[in-house]
Image: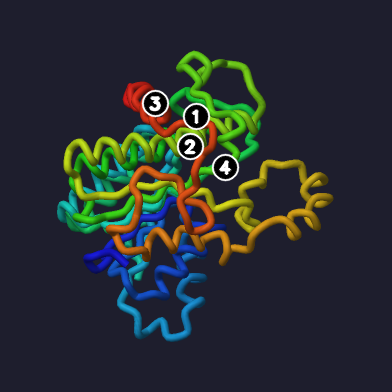
């Protein structure tokens, strides 16, 4: 647990899989005054809220508010609008934990990470209903994998727009509007698959009208960008003496996440026995997330990659090189 009581948590992609399971765990802990689920689909989000409440036996004894806000992370406009709304009603420095993974307030707002417009609208709505400096935890969890080639509403390859650019914009807008509390934590979900394709694509490649790589390659590129986002933010926070810690987390191969929903149904059916044998269940899948949430703030190593509840070293990949590449990533993303 951090040195200050946890208050507000924001989780993207929280209506299913790892995001939903983490939301259940945080809700049951009673350590948060409010948990915000940022999702694209209002119906699924409301069903998730009911499922979260039903998962706790003595729900009436909890004072934690469960809130849903709509956000399309593939749309730059949506991200900006979301942050704008969020900042209008929340005090500065309220956000303590941000996990970039996806009582109701009465404001059904959606989040589509592939849409700049959706992200902007989501933040605008979020700021209207939450006090500034209230956010203790941000979990950037939402993502897609294996999606057929498609450009986002803003003309960027969909994996990169949803998995990285939407979360990059969301996090930056929340920081700009001073929504994070001192000693807040930002958790960015990545994947060890990025080690097989650790490259950055240029703007022309990301906006190509036809695919230049396979869906899995685009996914790996987006996950490498997630890792570099954490590296770059940690460096920035250190230089500016900002007391917020950010880490990237590789949860491993977790079943029940719907991440492979774009995979051919026949192949998924054939692979099911192997998936159950080699994969983690959801409890195991969120274990590293909970480790980074509950560890003493002073022990969390900002900028590092965590896997299996410990820092994962990357043999052959120099950390200083990642810091240099992260500068390039930030320059491109901010454009």
Q: Earlier in the sequence, mark 2 or mark 4?
A: 2
Sequence-wise, the earlier of marks 3 and 2 is: 2
C-alpha distance separating marks 2 and 4: 18 Å
Upstream in the sequence, badge 2 or badge 1? Answer: 1
Which element carries disc 4, helix, strand or loop? helix
**Above or below, 22 relative to 211:** below
Taking the image as drawn, is residue 227 in sight?
yes
- Measuring from the top left, give residue 317's x and y in whole percent: 50, 32
- Distance from the alpha carbon under mark 3 to that under mark 2: 15 Å
Camera-nearest label, 2 or 4: 4
Residue at image mark 4: 192
**Residue at the disc numbered 2:** 162
State the colouring used for the structure image.
rainbow
Kindly identify which residue carries mark 1: 152
Q: Nearer the viewer, residue 230 or 322?
A: 322
User: Is label 3 in contact with label 1 (beta carbons under 8 Å)?
Assistant: no
Is residue 14 toward the left or the right of residue 323 in the image? right
**Can residue 90 be seen in the rendering of this structure?**
no
User: Mark 2 and 4 residues: CB-CB less than 8 Å, in contact?
Assistant: no
Q: CA distance from mark 4 to mark 1?
A: 25 Å
Instruction: Check if mark 2's residue and mark 1's residue have beta carbons within 8 Å.
Output: yes
> Where is the N terminus found, in terms of image quarters?
bottom left
Secondary structure category for the residue under label 1: loop
**Disc 3 crowd, CA 10 A, few/some/many (<14, 14-19, 20+):** some
- Horizontal and vertical percent position of residue 182: 19, 55
Separation (CA) of disc 2 from disc 1: 8 Å
Residue 329 tag number = 3
Residue found 42% across the figure and 75% down from its top:
28
**Left or right: where 211 falls relative to 313:** right
């Amino acid at each position: 647990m951090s040195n200050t009581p946890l208050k507000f948590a924001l989780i993207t992609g929280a209506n299913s899989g790892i995001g939903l399971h983490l939301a259940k765990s945080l809700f049951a802990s009673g350590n948060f005054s409010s948990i915000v689920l940022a999702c694209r689909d209002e119906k699924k989000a409301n069903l998730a809220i009911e499922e979260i409440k039903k998962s706790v036996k003595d729900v009436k004894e909890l004072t934690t508010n469960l809130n849903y806000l709509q956000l399309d992370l593939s749309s730059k406009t949506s991200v900006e609008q979301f942050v704008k709304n969020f900042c209008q009603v929340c005090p500065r420095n309220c956000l303590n934990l941000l996990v970039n993974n996806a009582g109701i307030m009465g404001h059904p707002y959606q989040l589509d990470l592939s849409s700049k417009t959706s992200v902007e609208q989501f933040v605008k709505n979020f700021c209207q209903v939450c006090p500034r400096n209230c956010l203790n935890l941000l979990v950037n969890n939402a993502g897609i994998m294996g999606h057929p080639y498609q450009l986002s509403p803003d003309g960027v390859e969909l994996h990169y727009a949803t998995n990285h650019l939407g979360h990059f914009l969301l996090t930056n807008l929340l920081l700009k509007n001073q929504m994070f509390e001192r000693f807040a934590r930002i958790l960015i979900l990545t994947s060890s698959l990025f080690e097989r394709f650790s490259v950055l694509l240029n703007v022309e490649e990301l906006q190509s009208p036809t695919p230049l790589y396979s869906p899995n390659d685009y996914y790996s590129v987006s996950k490498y960008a997630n890792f570099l986002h954490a590296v770059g933010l940690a460096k920035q926070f250190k230089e500016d003496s900002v007391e917020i810690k950010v880490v990237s987390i590789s949860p491993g191969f977790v079943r029940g996440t719907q991440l492979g929903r774009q995979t051919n149904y026949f192949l998924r059916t054939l692979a099911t026995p192997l998936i159950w044998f080699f994969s983690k269940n959801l409890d195991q899948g969120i274990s590293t997330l909970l480790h980074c949430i509950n560890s003493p703030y002073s022990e969390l190593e900002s900028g590092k990659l965590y896997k299996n509840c410990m820092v994962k070293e990357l043999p052959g990949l120099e950390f200083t090189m990642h810091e240099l590449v992260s500068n390039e990533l930030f320059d491109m993303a901010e454009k």
